[in-house]
Image (cartoon, rainbow, N blue to C red):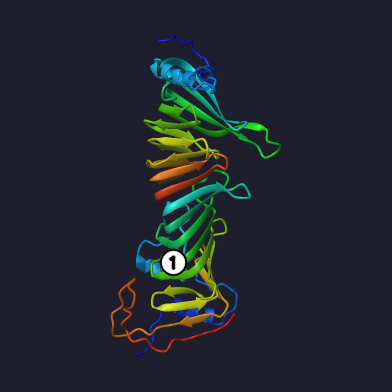
């Protein structure tokens, strides 16, 4: 198994994977098939101290930190450990890139290298743009729609307000939060 | 059969019948009720400020409004409860203060709004509750807003409540219906007169 030093950028590693797996000359189908077979035969790559920057078009919209990752080159999946994901956003004046307050963390994550989609599991904690904290079992992020979705019960906290629901959808660009099923907002006594 | 009405209610209805825009006096502010009979002595609705507020619904959407305030829109089978005050509606928007207080300072409810407190029930298409000003207004488009107080009813284009002073004001095409009660029937504190009781011609006042 290849030994990878700490703090290696997963993006760089993935670039290497892209070169070796996806950028083979398409003019020769035999070469492409051969490269694909080689990828299936490659062992998974173990990494420590992973940093990955995800892009949505030209916009960097994800910053993923993980204490470790196992990258499966056949399935193009990265299994992440102790993962924290920050979302970035453009401000309203001139498209300047800023760091959003939206952040999520979980003990386990699975990142789809081909589409910026990921799933976090085993107890997800997060913060919304307005500083609300939320807890749920698992979330799934769809890079194409930039939607963060949880089908598990969600609990959100904002000062003395506690909101629970059966599920949640967070629109990352607009910070709009949809809560679905058995919504309960409890404002504690002052 | 003679009419038996609490003195406070007679005063209140007389004030409404004049259809002026002065809140009907309700005497000194009443403490928060502990029983339904306490609530029945009220003129309108009274807000227990700072009490736990629970809003439930099937769906909700949270977003910042144009003014940068955090708002949550609750939809489908919305119910809100605070102390002995209950609200039901199809749609409810709660606007929260920027300081992070968990209690909304403004609430708008739309669609089959019913606000209940003790024997008082207000029905309208739309209700606005201002928790800072401690006021509420209940109005309807097409039909009128209605306040049932025990067996008596106030109907108007808009009904205003001062939720702290415990006063009510009805404005626009005001109609007051006072049902007679049977003096032989022992009064039960907090109980509503059965609807099967023959209803006499209502006392009606129109104004606005």
Closer to us: A9 or A29: A29
Residue A115 visible in the picture: yes
Q: Position of residue A45 (x, y in %)?
A: 43, 15
Q: Secondary structure at mark 1?
A: strand
Count of numbered circles in the view: 1
Residue B51 visible in the picture: no
Instruction: Name which residue lies at 50% across and 18% down.
Output: A17
Residue B151, above or below A22? below
Residue B89, above or below B179? above
Q: Which residue is mark 1?
A: B114
Residue B38, above or below A177? below
Closer to us: A162 or A145: A145
Q: Position of residue A90 (x, y in %)?
A: 63, 35
Left or right: where B162 falls relative to A47: right
Instruction: Name which residue lies at 59% across and 74% down.
Output: B22
Q: Residue furthest right?
A: A94
Q: Quadrant of the C terminus of chain B?
A: bottom right
Left or right: where A91 falls relative to B19: right
Q: Position of residue A132 (x, y in %)?
A: 50, 39
Q: Position of residue B50 (x, y in %)?
A: 47, 52
Closer to us: A119 or A74: A74
Residue A166, above or below B173? above
């Amino acid at each position: 198994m290849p030994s990878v030093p700490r703090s290696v950028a997963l993006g760089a590693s993935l670039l290497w994977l892209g070169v070796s797996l996806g950028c083979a000359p398409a003019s020769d189908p035999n070469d492409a098939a051969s490269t694909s077979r080689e990828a299936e035969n490659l062992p998974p790559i173990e990494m420590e101290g992973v940093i990955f920057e995800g892009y949505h078009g030209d916009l960097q919209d994800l910053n993923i930190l993980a204490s470790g990752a196992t990258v499966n080159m056949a399935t193009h999946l990265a299994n992440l450990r102790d993962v924290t994901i920050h979302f970035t956003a453009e401000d309203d004046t001139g498209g300047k890139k800023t760091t959003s307050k939206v952040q999520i963390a979980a003990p386990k994550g699975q990142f789809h290298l081909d589409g910026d989609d990921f799933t976090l599991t085993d107890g997800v904690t997060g913060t919304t743009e307005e500083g609300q904290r939320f807890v749920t079992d698992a979330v799934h992020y769809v890079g194409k729609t930039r939607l963060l979705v949880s089908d598990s019960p969600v609990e959100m906290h904002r000062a003395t307000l506690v909101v629970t629901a059966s599920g949640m959808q967070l629109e990352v660009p607009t910070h709009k939060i949809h809560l679905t099923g058995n919504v309960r907002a409890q404002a504690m006594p002052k | 059969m003679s009419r038996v009405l609490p003195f406070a209610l007679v005063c209140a209805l007389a004030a409404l019948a004049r259809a002026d825009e002065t809140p009907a006096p309700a005497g000194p502010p009443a403490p928060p009720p502990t029983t339904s009979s306490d609530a029945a002595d009220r003129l309108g609705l009274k807000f227990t400020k700072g009490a736990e507020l629970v809003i439930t619904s099937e769906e909700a959407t949270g977003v910042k409004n144009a003014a940068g305030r955090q708002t949550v829109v609750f939809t489908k089978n919305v119910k809100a409860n605070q102390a002995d005050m209950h609200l039901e509606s199809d749609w409810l928007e709660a606007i929260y203060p920027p300081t992070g207080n968990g209690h909304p300072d403004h609430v708008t409810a739309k669609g089959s709004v019913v606000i209940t407190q003790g024997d008082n029930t207000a029905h309208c298409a739309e209700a606005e509750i201002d928790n800072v000003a401690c006021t509420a207004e209940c109005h309807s488009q097409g039909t009128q807003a209605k306040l049932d107080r025990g067996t008596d009813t106030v109907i108007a284009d808009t009904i205003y409540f001062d939720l702290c002073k415990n006063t009510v004001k009805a404005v626009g095409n005001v109609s007051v219906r006072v049902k007679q009660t049977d003096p032989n029937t022992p009064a039960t504190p907090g109980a509503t007169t059965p609807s099967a009781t023959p209803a006499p011609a209502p006392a009606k006042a129109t104004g606005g």
